[in-house]
Amino acid sequence: MRPAFWANKTSFEKHDRMYIPDEYYNWIITASTSFKYSVRIISRASREILDYKNWWTVWYKKNTVSIESVTCKIPKSQKTQFTIAKFNEFMFHSEYPGCIKARDFIDGLAIHTFVVRTSSRLPIMPKYSAYISDIIPINIKKINDIKKVMQYIPDEYAEFWNVLCNWPTTNSDADE
């Protein structure tokens, strides 16, 4: 089954380049001839982008060891740490909230159980916006990359990119 944005192939073929967010909006809206899809534009002022980065650490553990290897008889080097990239199969069950069972391979024999939640209470969704300011600083490296390709952007779209290039900048890679 094709994704929704392939519903009207001719719509896609008409747009070999898109320069501003409004073009993506219009393309997605017109991709379906039945208009059964909707697009919601999220603005910084609407405060709809929530602060999950600081929220999840209140409710979930950053590092956890499997229940099977938590005993003191197992050396620290042999304890199984939870890392999402290490396992290929994950199981959740409503009877054990906050626990994940993981296997190294799909249908593998070894099962590791991890308690990932910090408490038995249900997590409350964050109520704070991720961004306080209406203009979010952009990494200076990204601004410099945009300036390098500005010569290839048609004049009718240049104003959007010029405004963006004048936004506050940051040197921190942590802001990525």
Image: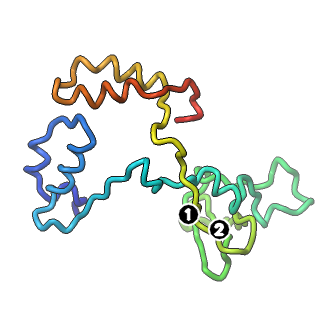
Pointers 1 and 2 in contact (C-beta within 8 Å): no
Q: Which structural element holds mark 1?
A: strand
- Compared to 3, does 21 lie above or below? above
**Residue linked to disc 2:** 100
Precedes in sequence: disc 1 or disc 2:
1
Nearest the viewer among 86 and 95 is 95
The picture quadrant where one finds residue 39 is bottom left
Nearest the viewer among 170 and 63 is 170
What residue lies at 58% left-to-right and 50% top-to-bottom?
85
Mark 1 neighbour density, 10 Å: few (under 14) some (14–19) many (20 or more): some
Q: Is residue 67 left or right of residue 18?
A: right
Q: How many marks?
A: 2
What residue lies at 43% left-to-right and 26% top-to-bottom?
142
> Type of residue at label 1?
Glu
What residue lies at 70% left-to-right and 66% top-to-bottom?
117
Mark 2 neighbour density, 10 Å: few (under 14) some (14–19) many (20 or more): some
Q: Which structural element holds mark 2?
A: strand
> Disc number at residue 112?
none
What residue lies at 43% left-to-right and 47% top-to-bottom?
44
The picture quadrant where one finds residue 120 is bottom right
Nearest the viewer among 168 and 111 is 168
> Disc number at residue 89?
1
- Compared to 36, does 15 lie above or below? above
- Quarter of the picture holding the N terminus: bottom left
Q: Is residue 131 left or right of residue 146?
A: right
Q: Is residue 148 left or right of residue 37?
A: right
